Structures are given as structure tokens and as C-alpha cells.
Amino acid sequence: MKNKSLKIFFMTVLFLAISFTVHANVLTASELTSQITVKGGLEFLSQNQASKIDSVRAELFLFPRTSSSQVVNYLTTEPQAEAGKNSIQYSWNKPEKIITYALSSVVNTREATRVRVKEKYPIQQIPEDIMQFLQPSKIITSSDSRIREQANTIAAGSDDLFVVVTQLADWTKKNIAYNLSSLTAEVAQPASWVIEHKEGVCDELTSLFIAMLRAIGIPGRFVSGISYSNSPSVPNSWGSHGWAEVWFPNTGWVGFDPTFGQYGWIDAGHIKLKESIDPSEKSVQFVWQARDMQVQTKPLTMTGSVLQEGNKRPGEIAITIEPLHDSIGFGSADIIRAKIKNLQNHYVATQIRLASAPEISIESAEQLVILEPQSETILSWLVRVSEGLKEGFSYSMPLLAISDLNETASAVLTVTENLPVYTVEDMKAELSVEQPRKALSCTLSPEEIMPTQTAEIKCKLPTGYTELCLKKECKTGTEVVFSIKYEKPGFFPQHVSTPDKQYGMTAVLHMQDTPVIELQNINSPKIISFEEEAIISWSIEKKSIAEPVNVIIAVISNGKNVSWKLDTFEAQVFTVNLPGRGLGAENEIVIRATWNDIAGKEYATEQKVYLSVQGTWWQKILLWMNGMLARVLD
């Protein structure tokens, strides 16, 4: 009977181990050579017999680029397109009503940058070109007080940047439920929505993670790409995916994927297609010259296949486990301890799971371990054996500890009826209990200032403390106020702490510059016929740190005004169709942008294009009359 019990228990643990190792070799390969394909299209629907399509342009922003973690071996397009720095540009003249475009590429991916030295938190100096990755945005709502409070609570008490970033990513993974609902699948939700509803898909998890980073002065950017997954929700194993890169001052950009639980590294099944401040930035833009046509765009689809796998990644940690008490009685509690050693010269963060037979209950079976290079630590689990074991028998119950990359260790716990019984309270005294996080209660007001303004941080001192410090300035009292002013624009983290660093709070002050919008890439014909339409397109781009507000884009032509009001600024392409029959013979067309800064001051910029309309003698009369009417209206 004893042997039979032993066999059953070992089979149970073996099954658990297999369930952790069904991942394909893709996730543990040191490098991969993969082929990916991106496809999209659009369809024109005729509105009447006069409908026609003259030309179409598509600008695709999602495509692989060579970086520190990947090399693009080749890239082809269908139809043939031009490759720019930030986009692939397709064009069609007199196309059919259904247009498709595709991109195929072979990419070699390998392990990206790892953090090898301890870097201090909070970050003290951030270069100007990195500051943009601290700004709040449409989706990355890092100025939300709930997000800042949660981030400060997680970061409090730590001065190790890798530890802080990893704990933020792990909190996101464990507290935001992955939910592929129609709401989160079709439209990316802001981080503020995610922290309130505690659900989302990869974009939402990553956006909240980046928002918490930026809220406490850590630059983060969003990465759009395609990745391999063994999830049942990804039937072809490859699908579009979003993850993050975090800036470390002495290391550079480092990958973190809270959805996959990969902290400080990204497996070779991740292929980067684009990096951005905000995930809502467009993946593709279209400009077309057509008449009486309705347009339906088709969603982008991504597929992938592995052409070649490299060797398996070397093990990163060594694990040994043992019970505090090797032999215990029925119903007894015990402590299982694991020694985890980092074998590498870089930081390692991984989950360690403890598995055993069903007769053993485990408190917090999965634990995060963060190890500095070549360091080691101890993890402990509180376990309890069932009281309902069969009398008169001795049981050998196997224990298995396993990491995310299937590094394992095993031990055996002997359970016999008449051996000592330890209570849960007895064992809790053996556990090292993590102290609660301590975040200061502070407010920053205002969070955005102009060059002539001063901001204030007001803090309440925690019980037992009489002094708080902001950088080298320290103040005493039950409530203290620090005044802040900067001479140059940018995003500046402000970290207030107690002298012993046990309590702390970080907020980011935005020192505004003058908001600037540029009109770019203006395309307009010089001559059209009376029966044609002039298709004029242009793009707008922000050339400042400050966000323009109350943005209005307008086209003024022949006494008529067409305008767009933007609730939030976003770099984008605009198109206007101007029928020749509604213009004059010679036309000055003004493209104008107006906007305000946060203080209400108004700014404007404009560009002019000139257009001639040709026609028969009676059409010229109509054009002359249009021109006269326009001058009257002006």
C-alpha cells in the first residue's frame, strides 16, 4: 500500500511538471529566424455611375527594423513600395475597387539588452531626448492620481531601479485580469480605465505598466509587434502583441512584457515592428483621390512561422529545496525553503512555483524572485498536510520547485501518523514577512507650469518623523511645502523622502515650452479640369514638449472654410476634396492650424498652395463668377 501511494503522488507531480513545460522550444531558444507577413487592404464602394478612383497612397508604420535585439535579413512588399525611415509607402494609379497590400520579411531575433549593474531609483538625470517618454498621453494616462499612488506604494522603500520596475510589472500581471472582451479587443482603453476595471488585453496591461513607470519618473515606451504564443486564444501561434521597453540610465532600453511575465528580458519569439509614446498611434494611413466613393478599410493581419531555432538558452538560476522538518505527522504544517542562485552576470527575475501532491495545500504557491548578478536568496512556502490520510500508513510526498524557464529542484516530505504535528502559527514564526510599503502623502500643484510659474509639493509627515527632503533641501514640521521652478522645458521627477528613505513619493513636474505645430508633406495638384476634384493632403506634427490644446485645422478656399477640431493632439494625415466646379480659375488655398497653450495664449501657422482650374469657354465664365463671389465673401 505504501508503494502504491508513493507511485500515485509521483505521477501527480509529474503531471504538474509537464503542464509547465508544454511551451514550444520557441520560448526557450537563444535565437530564432522567423518569417512574418503583414497584410491589409481597402475597398471602394461606388455611390453612382460617375464614381471613379484616380489614385491611392498607403503608409504602413508596422514593419520590422534592425535593432539591438533583431536583424532584418530581407524585406519584400506586394505591390512594390518605397521604404522610408518610419514607414513603408505604397501607391496605386487607377486601381481596382479592391486594393490589397502585403509585407513579408525574414527576421533573426536574439536576446536583447540585459541589466548588469545596479542602477539607482529614483532616476536623477534624464536626457532631453528621453524626456518625451515621461509625458502623459491619450492612453498612457500617467497623471492619474490613482496610478501615481499605486506606483509610489509599490516603489516605496527601494533604491534599486530594476527591482522597482520589475515589481511594477509583476503587480500589473497579477492584478489585471487578461480579458479578451470586445471592449478591450477592438479599442485600446486608457490606463485610467484599466486600473479602475482591473482587466484588459496585452495593450491595456502594458499601457498601465508604462503609466505607472512615467508617474514616478521612469521613462517607458510602447512596443508594437508580433509574437509567438502557446495560448489557446492564438490558434496559429503567432499574433499581434504589445510590450514595453524601459530606459535605464547606464544600460539603455530594456524589454519588459507584463503579459508574458518576462521582466528585464524578452524571448526570441518577440519581433518588434514599431516603438511609440502611445499605443493609439496609427498603424497605417491612407490618402486617396476618388469621386463619389465610400471607403472601407480592412484590418491588418499578421502571421509568422519559424524557419530556424538556435540553441536552448542556458539556465539562469540554480534551485535547491528542502523542508524545515523532513518528517511530520498528519495535519501538520511545515515550511519549504528554496535557495535560488543567479548563475549569470545580469539581473534575473522569475516566478518560482512550488507543486506537490493534492494532499498538501500550499500558501502562495507562486513567488517572484529578483536576483542581482551572481547573488542568491531564500524563498519560503507555508504548507499543510491533510488530516484525512489513512491511518497506519507512511507517505512519501514529493515536492517540486520550478521556474518560468523550467529550472527545477525536488525534495521529499515524509508524513507519518505518529510524528510531531506543527501548527500554522508555529510555522508562521519561521517565515520572513515582508513589511508593508510606505508611500508619503504628497500633492504636486500645478503639475504643468509655464516659465514664469512656480509649482509646490505639499507633504504630510508620517508618524514618528519630523523631517522630509527634496533632493538636498530638507524641511521640518508636521506638514512641509517645497517650491519648484525650472528654467528650461521638460519633464522633471520630484522625489520627496524621509532621511532614512523608508517613506518616499515621486511625482513628475511638466515644465512647458511653447507648443508648436508644423504643417508637413503638403500634396496638391497645380492644375485640374472643371470636372475634376483637387485632392489636397497634408500632415501635422508636434515640434515641442508642450501639448497644444484647442487645436483647429482648417482649409480656406474660394470663401469657404472646412475645419477639424481635435480633442487631443495626434500626428495624422488630413485630406480634402475640392471640386473644380466650385473653385475659381486661379485659387489661393490656405491650410491653417490654430491652437492654444495651457495658459490660453493662441498660436497659428499656415501654408498656401496655388491651383488653376481649366475648362471650356462657358466653364471659364462659371469659374470667373465663383472667383468674384469669393472676393465678396472675403
Image (spheres, helix red, strand yellow):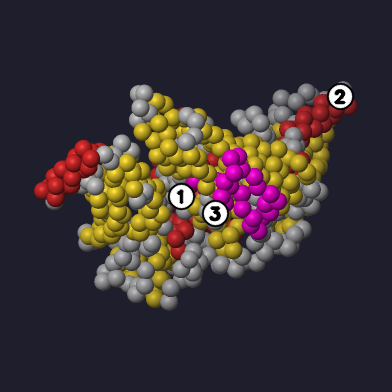
Q: Name the spot of residue 304 as percent of width and height, x first.
A: 67, 38
User: Left or right of 105: which side holds 586?
Assistant: left
Q: Circle 2 — which element?
A: helix
Q: Name the spot of residue 76 as percent of width and height, x first.
A: 64, 45
User: Left or right of 122: which side holds 547?
Assistant: left
Q: Identify residue for label 1.
A: 278
Residue 477 visible in this rendered orientation of the protein: no
Q: Name the spot of residue 446 as percent of width and height, x first.
A: 29, 61
Q: In the image, what residue type sits under mark 2?
A: Lys
Which mark sits nearer the N-terminus, 3 or 2?
Answer: 2
Query: Which residues are the magenta region?
Result: 59-84
Q: Is residue 167 magenta?
A: no
Q: Circle 3 — which element?
A: loop
Residue drawn 79% across the image and 24% down it: 391
Comparing labels 3 and 1, the label whose residue is closer to the camera: 3
Residue 488 visible in this rendered orientation of the protein: yes
Q: Identify residue for label 2.
A: 4
User: Left or right of 562: which side holds 504?
Assistant: right
Q: Identify residue for label 3.
A: 84
Which mark sits nearer the N-terminus, 2 or 1?
Answer: 2
Q: In the image, what residue type sits under mark 1?
A: Asp
